[in-house]
Structures are given as structure tokens and as C-alpha cells.
Image: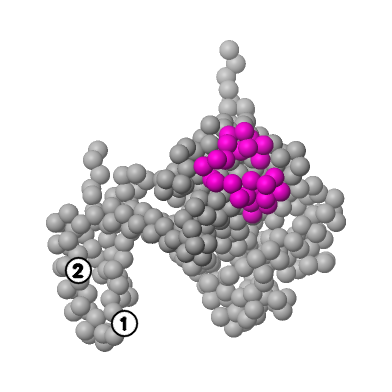
């Protein structure tokens, strides 16, 4: 059935913006767009302006306005201008256009032009890979060669170096290759190189083994240790286990996000991975624990996890809880197949085995659709085959 192209604009409940949905055929889903009103208007004037804006954007949409296409063109122009400006800057600094085609400068400037569009964690992850490549190129004397002279053989030597000297696995090796391939694509687009040497290298087979969920005995052992030695980390673990709130989101969670009366937690769009504000429920065991520690008596603007060791004004660093949990696991003798993220997997496994419906689990996980949840469950070893195992009829 043919999808409706757009929904008519509506005024928000707060009256500060209008919104409408537009069908994105490439992503096969609707995207929401907002048009905000000026804050200079009084509440009475704002309503009148909202009606005017409503009429204006309704007419625009009916006359062929396509925000998806405009967004795509703006993104292309932004990347093009940023890369060209970076290259121009290099040219003016070095006083020669040739220097802008040197391998080190090309890779670094094209990468710098991309970083502003990436999430912090993604930026740090890929920046370390770019740095690794540039250090290797300098070590081999390739950093001052022209990017166009870089060969397939040299690219393969870098990937071999990663596995032989850095000890990276096949998945990480493929990640490096795809990142380099994307940088060379940009060089080719701007006529810096004639061909993309990384396209001639195949991916290698990956053995994807993610973090394992904890078994029952492991859960009880870690729980006993944390209750005695680190109660704050135990609270952190419970949020992840019961509510599937990611560590990076938990770090930014404040007291006023918790509603014990309704039994919900608001994960704000500013901190969530998917940039959406969504509620998750507080299961009874966590609700009782939060009530017991009187979480709602703290200042509503305090971070739940702060450097004071209790709710406070100064949040922890990005990796603080990861490192604390890692030390606990090493103390108890667990290997690197387990991490802080294992608690989310553990909660999902336990919920399914306890009979929680997959639709309810999808909502609590904040997945976009059931297919995403199904893929996630399979990745952590849940295949929902109990009926097949127990009820298959005898031939």
C-alpha cells in the first residue's frame, strides 16, 4: 500500500512549536519536523502566530515542500564546504596547493571536517583509529607522500600490522578498513585521488562474540560483593538491569527524571542514544530499593550518580562506572567477556525467561520496532525455542 507522504502540521501542547511528519522512503519510516515560534511573543500573541505558521506550512507541504530532500542537500553542501575550506586552509598555510594532497594532511583534515557531526563516543573511537593509521604512516615514511600514490599493497600492510603488532581481531580490522575506505571516498570525490585503494581489499570473516549475560550464581556473587563494598555501583547496576538504561544515559540522569508515584523514569532526548524522550517503567524490586534509600528526598536537579558518592551537583566522568565495575569483575575473577553492559543483556534474558511479552520488552528497551528487539535477543543467545524443544511431536 502506498504511504501517505506527510501528515498535516499540528500545534504542540506547549504552544511553542508546530510539527509534522514526512515520509522518508530511504529509511522506510516517517521523520518528525518541528518549526519553532519566536520566544519574544506573549502567550496570547504566540497562539495567533502559531495559527499563522500552521496555515503557512500546510500550504508549503501541499505545494511540494520536501524537508527530506532539503535536509539531504544541506548535509551534502555542509560536508563539501567544510572539506574544501579545510583543504584551502592547508593550502594557504603551506603556501602551495600540492601540500594539500599530502597523505597526512588529507587524512587529518578530512577527518576533522567530519567530527562535528558525530556523537562524542563515536568521535573518540574513530579518532583513535585515524591517529593509529597516521602514526603507522609516519613510522613507515608514508606520511609525506601524495595520497594518490598510496597503494593497495601499503593498505594491506597497515591491516597486517594491526593484527600482528596491535593484536586486533577480525571485527576491529574490518572497522579500520571501512573507516579508511570512507576517507578515501571523500578524497576521490574531491579529485585528490584517482581511485579508492581500500575498495580492492575484502572484509575478513568476523566471529562476533559480544558481552555475555551473567548466570544466576554470578549475579548473586556480584550482588553480595557490591552491597558490601560499593552500594552506589549496585544501584547503577539495578538501573541497567531493570530499566535497560545505558551507562552513558545513567551518568546524566537526574532525580527529577524519577516519578515514584507513576513508577516511571524519563530518559531525556538530550542524553538518550536515539535522541528521543521516552519513559521506562520501574519494576517493583527497583521501586522498593529507591523508596528505601529515599531517592525522592534529594534536590530534584541533582545527578543521581555524582562525585560525592550520592546524588549531587557534579556528575561522574564518562568511564568512571565502567572502570569501577571492571575492577570488581577482575577482583572476582571474571574475564573480559563480561562488562557493565552485561547487566542489560542479563535483564533482557531474565525478562524473556520470566514470560515478559516481547512487545513489552521492546518498549522497555526503547527499540524502534520488534525486529530490532528480535535481532538483539538473538545476539545475546535468546532464540525463544523452548516450545520447539519441549513440544515437537514424535514421528
**Quarter-of-image position of residue 174:** top right
Residue situated in front as seen by the camera: 156 or 389: 156
Q: Residue at x 16, y 67 (%)?
A: 56
Q: Position of residue 165 (x, y in %)?
A: 76, 42
Instruction: Answer whether residue 151 is magenta in the image.
Output: yes
Position of 68 with respect to 56 (left or right) is right
**Quarter-of-image position of residue 10:** bottom left
Q: Residue at x 83, y 66 (%)?
A: 228
- For residue 39, the mark is 1
Majority secondary structure in the magenta region: helix
Residue situated in front as seen by the camera: 337 or 95: 95
Per the image, the residue denoted by label 2 is 54
Q: Residue at x 47, y 43 (%)?
A: 193
- For residue 139, the mark is none
Q: Which residues are magenta?
A: 131-158
Mark 1 surroundings: few (<14), some (14-19) or many (≥20) residues within 10 A: few
In the displayed structure, 54 sits above or below 223; it is below
Q: Position of residue 237 (x, y in %)?
A: 68, 60
Q: How many marks?
A: 2
Position of 338 with respect to 347 (left or right) is right
Instruction: Answer whether residue 317 is magenta in the image.
Output: no
On-image quarter of the C terminus: top right
Position of 352 with respect to 218 (left or right) is left
On-image quarter of the N terminus: top left
Helix, strand or loop for disc 1: loop
**Quarter-of-image position of residue 35:** bottom left
Amino acid at each position: 500500500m502506498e504511504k501517505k507522504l506527510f501528515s498535516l502540521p499540528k500545534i504542540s501542547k506547549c504552544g511553542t512549536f508546530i510539527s509534522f511528519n514526512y515520509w522518508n522512503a530511504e529509511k522506510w519510516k516517517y521523520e518528525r519536523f518541528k518549526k519553532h515560534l519566536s520566544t519574544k511573543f506573549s502567550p496570547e500573541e504566540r497562539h495567533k502566530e502559531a495559527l499563522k505558521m500552521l496555515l503557512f506550512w500546510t500550504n508549503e507541504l501541499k505545494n511540494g515542500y520536501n524537508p527530506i530532500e532539503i535536509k539531504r542537500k544541506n548535509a551534502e553542501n555542509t560536508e563539501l564546504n567544510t572539506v574544501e575550506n579545510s583543504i584551502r586552509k592547508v593550502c594557504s598555510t603551506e603556501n602551495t596547493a600540492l601540500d594539500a594532497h599530502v597523505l597526512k594532511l588529507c587524512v587529518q583534515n578530512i577527518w576533522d571536517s567530519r567530527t562535528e557531526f558525530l556523537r562524542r563516543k563515536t568521535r573518540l573511537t574513530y579518532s583513535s583509529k585515524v591517529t593509529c593509521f597516521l602514526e603507522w604512516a609516519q613510522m613507515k615514511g608514508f606520511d609525506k607522500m601524495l595520497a594518490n600514490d598510496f597503494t593497495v599493497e601499503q593498505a594491506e600492510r597497515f591491516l597486517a600490522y594491526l593484527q600482528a603488532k596491535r593484536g586486533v581481531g577480525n571485527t576491529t580490522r574490518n572497522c579500520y578498513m571501512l573507516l579508511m575506505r570512507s576517507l578515501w571516498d571523500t578524497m576521490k570525490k574531491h579529485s585528490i585521488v584517482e581511485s579508492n585503494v581500500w575498495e580492492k581489499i575484502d572484509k575478513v570473516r568476523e566471529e562476533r562474540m559480544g558481552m555475555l549475560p551473567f548466570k544466576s550464581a554470578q549475579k548473586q556473587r556480584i550482588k553480595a560483593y557490591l552491597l558490601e563494598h560499593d552500594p552506589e555501583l549496585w544501584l547503577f547496576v539495578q538501573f541497567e538491569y531493570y530499566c535497560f538504561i545505558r551507562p552513558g544515559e545513567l551518568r546524566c540522569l537526574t532525580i527529577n527524571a524519577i516519578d515514584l508515584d507513576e513508577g516511571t523514569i524519563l530518559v531525556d532526548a538530550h542524553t538518550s542514544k536515539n535522541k528521543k524522550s521516552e519513559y521506562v517503567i520501574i519494576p517493583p524490586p527497583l521501586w522498593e530499593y529507591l523508596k528505601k534509600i529515599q531517592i525522592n528526598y534529594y534536590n530534584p536537579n541533582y545527578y543521581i550518580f555524582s562525585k560525592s558518592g550520592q546524588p549531587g551537583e557534579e556528575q561522574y566522568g564518562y568511564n568512571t562506572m565502567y572502570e569501577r565495575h571492571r575492577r570488581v569483575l577482575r577482583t572476582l575473577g571474571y574475564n573480559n567477556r563480561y562488562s557493565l553492559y552485561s547487566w542489560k543483556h542479563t535483564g533482557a534474558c531474565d525478562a524473556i525467561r520470566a514470560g515478559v511479552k516481547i512487545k513489552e520488552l521492546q518498549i522497555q528497551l526503547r527499540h524502534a520496532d520488534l525486529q530490532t528487539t528480535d535481532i538483539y535477543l538473538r545476539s545475546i543467545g535468546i532464540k525463544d525455542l523452548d516450545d520447539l524443544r519441549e513440544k515437537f511431536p514424535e514421528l
